Image: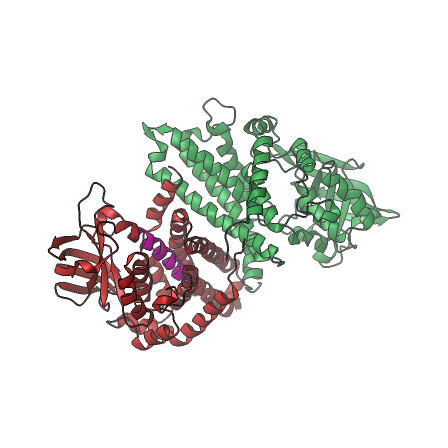
């Protein structure tokens, strides 16, 4: 049993942290929240040069051949810095889908370009029903000669506005059970029939409504097998859920540090507020939540990285971290007092991201239900 | 990073589970419950000794099993899971023994260690006093030098198993002028010494576990002082270097959760299986999540120790998390049992032999014993986060 990271992993973390501290200060984060694209092409290029996009891709596709656990470390640092942009969409949502299910030809075509920072992708999964279950997939893709024609609405598609391609999860057959009859399509995001509306959110991320109006997709753009797309989505969701938990852990750790530092500096009643027991206990509760979040996330990440079954651990991680991160930001605000309530301050960045992350890939209730099933209830 | 155990470690875990399945059967536990001795069994302690697992944690030179930290972790999780009674040996094995090994004279080690490992002697801990709980260092029980002895006078309270113990390890004040931490000495006392009176205290579970202990001019030979005079406080901190993961709490919670899950799969309320009730499902799932988080927090302590590091705030965090978890689990169990919850063991209709009720009541004391949750948070804040003192 070893709950620590290797030297290489620690170096990856340090390099990422130093890089993002320098290249992604909170001023940039706030600026990009207002920016239509929501990312900095210069920063994107630098990240690609560091090999970050292809970190977990096999070397044969211009990747660095590292593991999902390694990627989780990187995602944690990105969460700490509130890094804006389509990295998660491109690398985790789309990248892993392609790795998992695409043909050799598709992999050769797409993965090197992603690794080099030349392509931005996303996964168009959720619909207005806002659920992560197979029966929530109602958008239709109907066969027309050698093409499929997609009609319907996807909602909460991250970074559709800047994507070159979207992987659209569509229903190709109404089967006996909702898991059957779902297919993944690689869609040109800038093609005809697609209308994208940017939705402003508190988290500064680029969520979109995407309306598909007779969008024609050649059958060669199917990723994986016809009608058998849901098991792929299920696998990707596991990685996405844990990847998001990692980002949340990074943010929570930063909030803890900010709050403890503030408690040491802010003086009231002739002494630092951190010398009052109420504040000390808030901080103790925060670090307990942060440490618990770290290890439950790492446990799930390690299992996924090793290819071990991890359904229970993934849901436990998200159920826990969803609420722990929220608790940590709430206490962080209490410690900072009124200044933390100002738009200028960094606390709102984390508070809002914590809230947006809570329902993403399933909220605590959704994942508790998964755990209940795993318990045999 | 590796969250798994080695094949040898897993094999050891299987052996421990097999042994405990047999020795700590439901009948055995029911029998203890009936006698009001839920956490105390000299018989079980002896069986562990015979198996060579009583002092599993101790170095071989002191009659121990020399088990690795991870083996101890696995062992203790199983002990917790089986709700095995450790009261007859916990003080000797986990707390006093380590202090003796590090600070004892050769004579003291020869005299006191073998009876512990042979399960021949039960120890109780004379630490807390009516005016010295969280502020233990302010203790007043005094020891005055007189010829070849020290004469001890004072009162201890919350002394678990004082009524069953053969010996007592005791903190006393030997220098009232010194700053409080530096005027304390540590003694090893025979409970049958003249002048010792044990008065029962009945806890909320109507059980007689702890006591008041009065020392009225009790003579203790000078050679019964452990460590140097006025260094007793620091001697008592030695147990910090031994296994402190707090994994037992997690093990106990796991078993209670399993029993609740089984209960819900079999029991109907309003014509519907409890297991199909959304609220029940979520409460149980939430407990499973919290147990896993607590497990990770406990494992981390063991992992640090396995690397030769001395955990500081991490062990306090594990104690905090594990004990608070048991309160919440007891609470959830009682909520699920509804009107049946308050039925005591032995009452007709009492579910699960009243064990969830007892877990609920017992958990209340655990966030106070061995350092309150508030003290744990103080330690986390001051030592872990280096926040300033008042």
Chain in green colour: B
Q: Quadrant of the C terminus of chain B?
A: bottom right
Give residue B54's position: percent from left, percent from top: 67, 40
Outermost residue, right side? B147
Q: Magenta stretch: dominant SS?
A: helix
Nearer the observer, A319 or B75:
B75
Q: Is residue A311 magenta?
A: no
Closer to the camera, A373 or B86? A373
> For the magenta stretch, what is the residue range?
A234-252
Residue A232 percent coordinates (x, y): 30, 53
**Residue A15 in view:** yes
Lateral position of residue A151 relative to residue B21, left or right: left
Colour representing chain A: red
Residue A307 x, y percent position in the rendering: 41, 53
State the image coordinates of residue A335 (x, y, percent, origin top left).
44, 62
- Going by the image, does B317 lie left or right of B240? left
In the image, is residue A12 above or below residue A305?
Answer: below
Residue A237, magenta (yes or no): yes
**Front in this rendered view, residue A129 or A109:** A109
In the figure, is residue A231 to the left or right of A143?
right
Residue at x-position 72% and y-position 50%: B99
């Amino acid at each position: 049993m070893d709950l620590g990271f290797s030297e290489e992993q620690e170096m990856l973390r340090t390099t990422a942290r130093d890089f993002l501290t320098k290249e992604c200060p909170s001023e940039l984060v706030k600026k990009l929240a207002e920016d239509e694209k929501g990312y900095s092409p210069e920063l994107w290029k630098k990240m690609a040069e560091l090999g970050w996009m292809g970190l977990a891709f096999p070397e044969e596709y211009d990747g660095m051949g590292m593991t999902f656990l390694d990627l989780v470390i990187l995602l944690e640092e990105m969460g700490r810095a509130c890094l804006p942009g389509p990295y998660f969409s491109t690398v985790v949502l789309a990248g892993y889908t392609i790795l998992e299910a695409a043909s050799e030809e598709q992999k050769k075509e797409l993965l090197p370009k992603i690794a080099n920072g030349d392509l931005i992708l996303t996964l168009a999964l959720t619909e207005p029903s806002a659920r992560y279950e197979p029966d929530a997939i109602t958008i239709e893709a109907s066969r027309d000669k050698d093409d499929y024609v997609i009609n319907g609405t996807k909602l909460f598609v991250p970074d559709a506005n800047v994507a070159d391609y979207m992987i659209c999860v569509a229903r190709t057959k109404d089967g006996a059970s909702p898991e059957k009859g779902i297919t993944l399509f690689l869609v040109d995001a800038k093609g005809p029939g697609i209308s994208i509306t940017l939705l402003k959110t508190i988290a500064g991320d680029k969520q979109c409504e995407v309306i598909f109006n007779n969008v024609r997709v050649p059958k060669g753009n199917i990723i994986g097998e016809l009608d058998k797309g849901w098991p792929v989505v299920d696998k990707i969701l596991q990685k996405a859920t844990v990847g998001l938990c990692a980002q949340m852990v990074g943010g929570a750790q930063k909030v803890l540090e900010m709050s403890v530092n503030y408690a040491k500096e802010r003086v009231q009643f002739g002494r630092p507020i951190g010398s009052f027991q109420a504040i000390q206990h808030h901080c103790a509760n925060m670090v307990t939540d942060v440490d618990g979040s770290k290890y439950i996330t790492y446990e799930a990440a390690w299992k996924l990285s090793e290819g071990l079954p991890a359904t229970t651990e993934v849901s436990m991680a998200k159920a826990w971290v969803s609420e722990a991160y929220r608790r940590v930001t709430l206490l962080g605000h209490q410690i900072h007092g009124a200044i933390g309530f100002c738009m200028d301050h960094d606390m709102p960045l984390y508070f809002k991201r914590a809230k947006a992350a809570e329902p993403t890939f399933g909220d605590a209730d959704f994942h508790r239900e998964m755990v209940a099933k795993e318990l045999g209830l | 990073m590796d969250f798994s155990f080695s094949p040898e470690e897993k094999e050891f875990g299987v052996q421990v589970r097999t042994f405990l399945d047999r020795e700590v059967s439901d009948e055995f536990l029911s029998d203890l419950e009936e006698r009001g001795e839920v956490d105390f069994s000299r018989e079980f302690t002896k069986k562990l000794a015979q198996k060579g697992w009583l002092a599993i944690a101790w170095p071989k030179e002191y009659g121990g099993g020399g088990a690795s930290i991870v083996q101890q972790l696995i062992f203790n999780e199983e002990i917790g899971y089986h709700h095995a009674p450790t009261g007859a040996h916990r003080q000797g094995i986990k707390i006093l023994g380590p202090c003796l090994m590090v600070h004892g004279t050769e004579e003291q080690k020869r005299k006191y260690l073998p009876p512990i490992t042979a399960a021949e002697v039960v120890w109780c801990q004379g630490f807390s006093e009516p005016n010295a709980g969280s502020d233990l260092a302010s203790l007043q029980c005094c020891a005055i030098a007189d010829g070849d002895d020290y004469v001890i006078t004072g009162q201890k309270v919350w002394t678990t198993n004082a009524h069953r113990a053969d010996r007592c390890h005791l903190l006393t004040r030997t220098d009232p002028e010194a700053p409080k931490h530096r005027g304390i000495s540590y003694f090893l006392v025979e409970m049958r010494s003249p002048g010792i009176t044990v008065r029962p205290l009945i806890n909320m579970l109507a059980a007689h576990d702890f006591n008041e202990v009065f020392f009225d001019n009790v003579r203790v030979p000078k050679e019964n002082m452990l460590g140097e005079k006025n260094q007793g406080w620091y001697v008592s901190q030695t147990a910090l270097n031994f296994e402190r993961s707090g994994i037992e709490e997690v093990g106990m919670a796991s078993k209670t959760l399993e029993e609740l899950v089984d209960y819900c799969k079999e029991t109907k309320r309003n014509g519907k299986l409890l297991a199909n009730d959304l609220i029940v499902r979520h409460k149980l799932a939430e407990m499973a999540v919290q147990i896993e988080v607590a497990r990770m927090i406990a494992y981390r302590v063991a992992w640090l120790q396995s690397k030769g590091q001395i955990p500081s705030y991490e062990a306090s965090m594990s104690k905090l998390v594990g004990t608070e978890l048991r309160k919440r689990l007891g609470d959830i169990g009682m909520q699920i049992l509804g009107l049946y919850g308050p039925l005591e063991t032995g009452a007709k209709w009492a579910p699960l032999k009243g064990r969830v009720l007892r877990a609920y009541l017992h958990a209340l004391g655990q966030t106070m014993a061995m350092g309150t949750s508030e003290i744990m948070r103080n330690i986390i804040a001051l030592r872990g986060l280096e926040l300033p003192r008042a």
